[in-house]
Image (cartoon, rainbow, N blue to C red):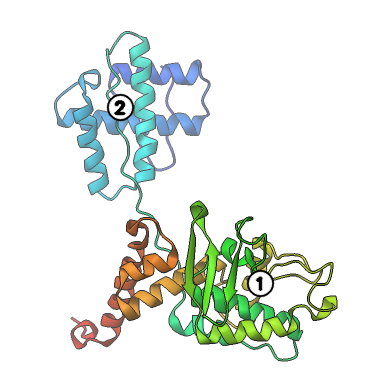
Amino acid sequence: MAEIPAPPGQAVAVPDPMALRYLDHVRFEKRLAARTLALYTLDLEKLAQFAAGVKLPLLQLTSAHIRRFVAQMHSGGRSGRGIALILSGWRGFFTWAGRQGLVAHNPVQDVRAPKAPKPLPKALVVDDAVRLAEFDRSGADPWLEARDTAMVELLYGGGLRVGELVGLDAQPGADTQRQGRGWVDLQAGEAHVFGKGSKRRSVPVGRAAVAALQAWLVLRAAPFGGEGAARLDAALFVGHRGARLTAQSVWLRLRQRSQQAGLTTPVHPHMLRHSFASHLLQSSGDLRAVQELLGHANITTTQVYTRLDFQHLAKVYDAAHPRARRKP
C-alpha cells in the first residue's frame, strides 16, 4: 500500500489491516485529495486506539462502544462539531465494511455527536442601551432623527421583533387586522403587534417611547403633503418615498445609528430585543412576565435570558465582592 500523507507535525499509523484496505479504497477508487485522506487516516487511527483500549478488533465494535468513545472525546474537551466529523469518517469505514460483507450492522449509524450549546444572545449593557436610546444627532435631518429615535425606543422599550415593528400601521384601519398588521395606541400606552405564528399580543409602551412616537407622528406626513396623501403608506414607519420601511432598512439604520452614538458593537434590531428581555429580567426576576412580553410560546425559549442574567450577576460579583477581588 502506498504511504498515507500526514498533516505537518502529525504521525499517521493505522496498523489494522481492514482500515488499511479501506484507505486504499478511498484513495484509489474515490480519488480523495491528500489532505482529506490524511484526515480519514487520523480518524481511523483514533478508532484503532479506542478499540485497543477495549481489546477488540475494529470490526467487532458495537454501538455501545462507539457511544463510549464519543463520551470520552466529549469529556476530553472535543467540540460537538469535531466529534461529528470523526463519526462521519468512522461511519464511512463501517459502511464500506458492510458492503464487503465484513459486518452485519454499522455500529456508527445511529450514533450522533453531542449538540453544541446554543450561543447566548447578544445584549447591550444597560448604559449602552440607554446611550443609544437617548442619542441625539445635532444638525441631522429632524424627520429622520424623529423616526429613528422612535424605532429605537420601540425596539428596546417594547422588545419588538423587527418584523413586528415594520408591520405597525400609524392608525388601525379596516385592513390592519385583516392583513396581519399591528398598531400603537398612544393613549393606552400599548402596542398591538402581530407576531410569530400569526399570534397577536399587546406590549406596554413606556413614557419615553410614547413621547418619541408623538414627536415622530407630528413630522411623519409632512414631506408628502399631510395625512391621507396618495403616496404615503399606512405604515407607522416610512421611508423618504412614503413606502413602508423594510426590515433590512431598519437593520441598516440601526447599525449606522449605533456607530454614530459611539457604541463599539454594531447594533441590530434583535440585539435590542435581547437587551429588553435581559434588562427586564435583571430588574424584575419575573421570567413569566418576560415570556408574555416577548411573545414566546414556550418558556424554555425565554429561559436563555436567565443565563444572560447569571452572566451579569457573575460579573457584578467579580467586580464588587472582596473575596472575588482578592488575589491568591
Residue 278: x percent and y percent?
39, 73
Taking the image as shown, residue 56 lies to the left or right of residue 299, namely: left
Q: Amino acid at mark 1?
A: Gln
Residue 112 visible in rendering: yes
- Mark 1, residue position: 171
Q: Residue at x 57, y 63 (%)?
A: 164
Say few, some or many: other residues with alpha carbon within 10 Å of mark 1 (under 14 / 14 to 19 / 20 or more): some
Q: How many marks?
A: 2
Q: Earlier in the sequence, mark 2 or mark 1?
A: 2
Q: Quadrant of residue 69?
A: top left
Q: Nearer the viewer, residue 290 or 91?
A: 290
Q: Amino acid at mark 2?
A: Val
Give the Cα distance between marks 2 and 1: 59 Å
Helix, strand or loop at label 1? It is loop
- Going by the picture, which residue comes out furthest to the left? 55
Residue 259 visible in rendering: no
Q: Residue at x 20, y 36 (%)?
A: 68
Q: Nearer the viewer, residue 278 or 158?
A: 158
- Mark 2, residue position: 108
Specify the quadrant that holds the N terminus: top left
